[in-house]
Image: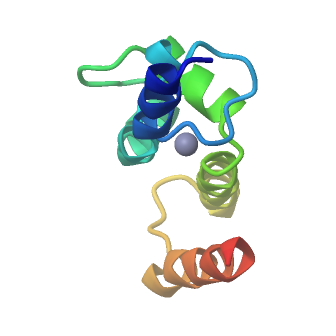
């Protein structure tokens, strides 16, 4: 990998990339900002494959996707149409932040 490629690699935010082409990788910020839409299957601007590839390859972002999925699952099980307790998600995000540190 050339120095220039390393720089490009760093700027994509794909620090934990495990094989996907860095140039095809969307930045972590972008992947995380569309995680809701990704799970809804409605992505504005980015392709589903690009986001999926990111979460597949990025160990830093994967827990966020996993958490979001688990959260949605819990809500679904709690009953359709029911609103999530606001504090629950905040608590989960707190726990995730601690686990990340
Ligand atoms: Zn990432």
* Residue at 52% over, 13% down: 49
Q: Position of residue 81 (x, y in %)?
A: 45, 56
Residue located 61% across and 42% down the image: 15
Q: Quadrant of ligand 1?
A: top right
Q: Nearer the viewer, residue 85 or 14?
A: 14
Q: At which x and y percent is residue 64?
A: 60, 54
- Rendered image quadrant of residue 83: bottom left
Tell me how many marks there are: 0
Q: Toward the viewer: 26 or 63? A: 26
Determine whether, in the image, residue 34 is placed left or right of residue 94. Answer: left
Assign the C terminus to one quadrant of the image: bottom right
- Up the image or down, 67 lies above or below 47; here it is below
Q: Is residue 3 left or right of residue 99?
A: left
Q: Nearer the viewer, residue 50 or 19?
A: 19
98 to the left or right of 37: right
In the rendering, at what x and y percent does residue 11 appear? 40, 38
Q: Residue furthest left?
A: 45
Residue positioned most to the front = 3
Location of residue 19 with respect to 13 vertically, above or below? above
| Residue 60 pos. (x, y %) | 65, 51
Q: Is residue 97 above or below residue 56?
A: below
| Residue at (44, 47) in percent of width and height | 32
Is 19 in front, or is 91?
19
Quarter containing the N terminus: top right
């Amino acid at each position: 990998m050339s120095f220039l490629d390393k720089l490009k690699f760093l700027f994509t935010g794909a620090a934990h990339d495990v094989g996907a082409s860095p140039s095809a990788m969307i930045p972590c910020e972008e992947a995380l900002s569309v995680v809701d839409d990704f799970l809804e299957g409605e992505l504005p601007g980015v392709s589903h494959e690009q986001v999926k590839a990111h979460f597949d390859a990025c160990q830093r972002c994967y827990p966020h996707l996993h958490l979001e999925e688990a959260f949605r699952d819990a809500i679904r099980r709690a009953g359709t149409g029911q609103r999530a307790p606001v504090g629950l998600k905040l608590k989960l995000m707190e726990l995730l932040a601690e686990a990340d540190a």
